[in-house]
């Protein structure tokens, strides 16, 4: 019977466990790196597809909302029709586009209906109708 525990040598422990500590083998590290690389390529492919889709959504035609934004900034409105092109808003970007705007009194104190139309080579490309409240505008004479 032993009273004091004996100290084992490190070489005898290695022989018993069959491995040198808790380290990873080269094969395990290579498999982990391969999985990581495949995951990174999958993520990069997904990002590339999303960027391509976002680029395809970019509009290269004028929208009536830009005309509406300019009109809303004015203090007063008057009934009538106005026609123009996009040369003053977007110089040389939309040479074959024109726009028309018709402002009509909506029957209340300063409430107007504004119809915007955008034409490309004579054909309607987009339309927008908004209601604008401008109380400082004179009432139309009927």
Image (spheres, grey):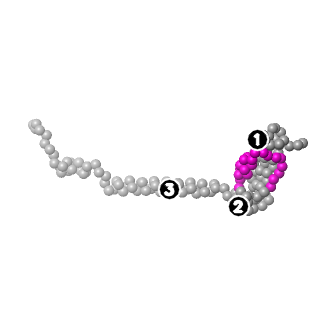
* Identity of the residue drawn at 78% across and 40% down: 135
- Quadrant where the C terminus is found in the figure: top right
Q: Position of residue 29 (x, y in %)?
A: 35, 54
Residue occupied by mark 2: 91
Closer to the N terminus: mark 2 or mark 3?
Answer: 3
* Identity of the residue drawn at 77% across and 55% down: 99
Camera-side mark, 2 or 3? 2
**Residue 116 shows which numbered tag?**
none
Instruction: Name the foreground residue: 29 vs 63.
Output: 63
The answer to whether residue 124 of the structure is visible from this angle is no
Task: Read off the magenta span.
Answer: 62-83
Residue occupied by mark 1: 133
Instruction: Name the foreground residue: 122 vs 88.
Output: 88
Quadrant of the rendered image containing residue 62:
bottom right
Tags 1 and 2 touching, CB below 8 Å: no
Where disc 1 sits, the SS reads strand
Residue occupied by mark 3: 44
């Amino acid at each position: 019977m032993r009273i004091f525990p004996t100290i084992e040598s490190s070489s005898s422990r290695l022989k018993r466990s069959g491995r040198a500590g808790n380290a990873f083998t080269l094969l395990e590290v290579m498999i982990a790196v391969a999985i990581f690389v495949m995951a990174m390529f999958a993520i990069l492919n997904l990002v590339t597809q999303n960027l391509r889709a976002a680029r395809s959504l970019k509009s290269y035609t004028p929208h009536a909302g830009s005309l509406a934004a300019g009109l809303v900034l004015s203090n007063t409105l008057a009934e009538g029709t106005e026609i123009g092109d996009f040369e003053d808003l977007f110089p040389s970007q939309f040479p074959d586009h024109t726009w028309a705007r018709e402002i009509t009194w909506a029957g209340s104190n300063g409430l107007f209906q504004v119809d915007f139309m955008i034409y490309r080579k004579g054909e309607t490309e987009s339309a927008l109708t908004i209601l604008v409240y401008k109380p400082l505008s004179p009432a139309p004479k009927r």
